Image (cartoon, rainbow, N blue to C red):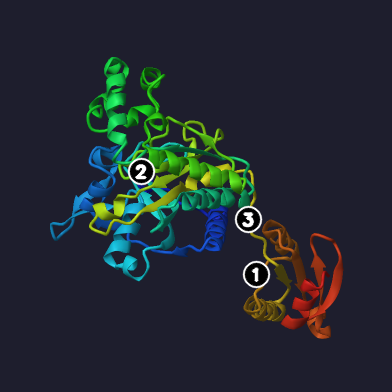
Amino acid sequence: MAITGIKGFNDILPGEVEKWQHIEATARRVFELYGLSEIRIPILEKTELFCRSIGDATDIVEKEMYSFEDKGGNKVTMRPEGTASVMRAYVEHKMHALDPVARLYYMGPMFRYERPQKGRYRQFHQIGAEITGVAAPTVDAQVLTMLTHFFQELGLTEPSLQINSLGCPCCRPAYREALKKFLLDRIDKLCDDCKRRYETNPLRALDCKSAGCQEATQGAPSMLDHLCAECGDHFDKTRKHLELVGTPYSINQRMVRGLDYYTRTTFEMVTTMLGAQSAVAAGGRYDGLISSIGGPQIPGIGFAMGVERVALLLAEKDFSRRPDLFIAALGDEAHAEAFRLMSALQRLGFAVEIDYEGKSLKSQMRRADKFNSRFTLIIGGDELARGTAPLKNMDGGTQVEAALDAASIQAAMTGGA
């Protein structure tokens, strides 16, 4: 019996991987325009990191983490998200001692035991960004603008930005009690998960997808009506700076996010193109996270996007690569010359393909069509004798004679032949 992959752990094959590479390259280019540098974090972390940062009462910690004891008896977890790992590295390596302001981005696989469905897998991939050391709302607006800029660079009109504020440890407790009081009369309508979380994490009922929870929370009090003066001012200034630079947004008062470390500004990039999986990117401010894992009291803000979901938004776009040149060769000597030219042109930065098996010219030209090469060069005995061969532009249909040396072929291809 053939061995197959594990459910929810997917292969990304040629033809699709080029799209992923485009997404990653766009993220690197845009994020570095905003002063961010890449950080690479390990897949395996101590389980305590995620329990302390994400929260014991979250779905991720309660039900979704891949956790186990290693051979040394240590409790370890395959990272379910990237922010906690980045902040652990920030604290462990005392990056804050050099400068509390760090602008970092990362990309790679994350792991959660969930029911696999379109856009949601057990091994999934995220691109994320984190900025520490700045409490001012201007950095919130810049992060949101950078994220919007990224999607614009991909040529996407969706997703759109939604924002909210979750307040701070000063004003959120009063709101939490007001929400619990509101939900108590409707608790029978809540799903089993939200009933269980009523005491520990009642805010999650606001973004629960259960029909009963959505009905029960209609008319629920809004966190925006319970913000303290400082949180209200922070949210107002964030909005003003977004408007100042023309970054479009809407307010979603039901947005709470699933991680305990968020404070003040929270946000999602949402789309109507992916069915139930509407959030393509999400994040927020986490001013207490760094201190909760043993670091100093330094604020931060960040986000992560799901690469699988972004790739689905680009489903109609073609990212396949074309070789610059296909060399068709007839006979052993011509084949050797084709191999020599291919190697020389590859060293000059051109993608070149040849036939390795000495097939007929007709068969080789069919393969050139399959590759969709920009140019073709045909070499036989006559071409070897005179030292030139026909180089055809497959898009324009024009043809020139090119000398059988890499520099001449390079000049002919780049000169618009």
Work out how far the residue at label 3 is from the one at label 2, CA to CA, in angstroms: 42 Å
Q: Which mark sits nearer the N-terminus, 2 or 1?
A: 2
Q: What residue would you read off at disc 3?
A: 320
- Give amino acid for label 1: Ala
* Kind of residue at badge 2: Thr
Q: Residues within 10 Å of mark 2 (few under 14, many from 20)?
A: many
Q: Looking at the picture, which amino acid does disc 3 mark?
A: Ser
Residue 417 falls in which quadrant of the image? bottom right
**Mark 1 = which residue?**
351
In the image: residue 77, left or right of residue 38 = left
Residue 234 place in picture, x, y as percent: 44, 44
Pick whichever of labels 3 and 1 is earlier in the sequence.
3
What residue lies at 82% left-to-right and 80% top-to-bottom? 388
Q: Between disc 3 and disc 2, whose residue precedes?
A: 2
Q: Which residue is disc 2 drawn over?
A: 263
Q: Nearer the viewer, residue 71 or 96?
A: 96
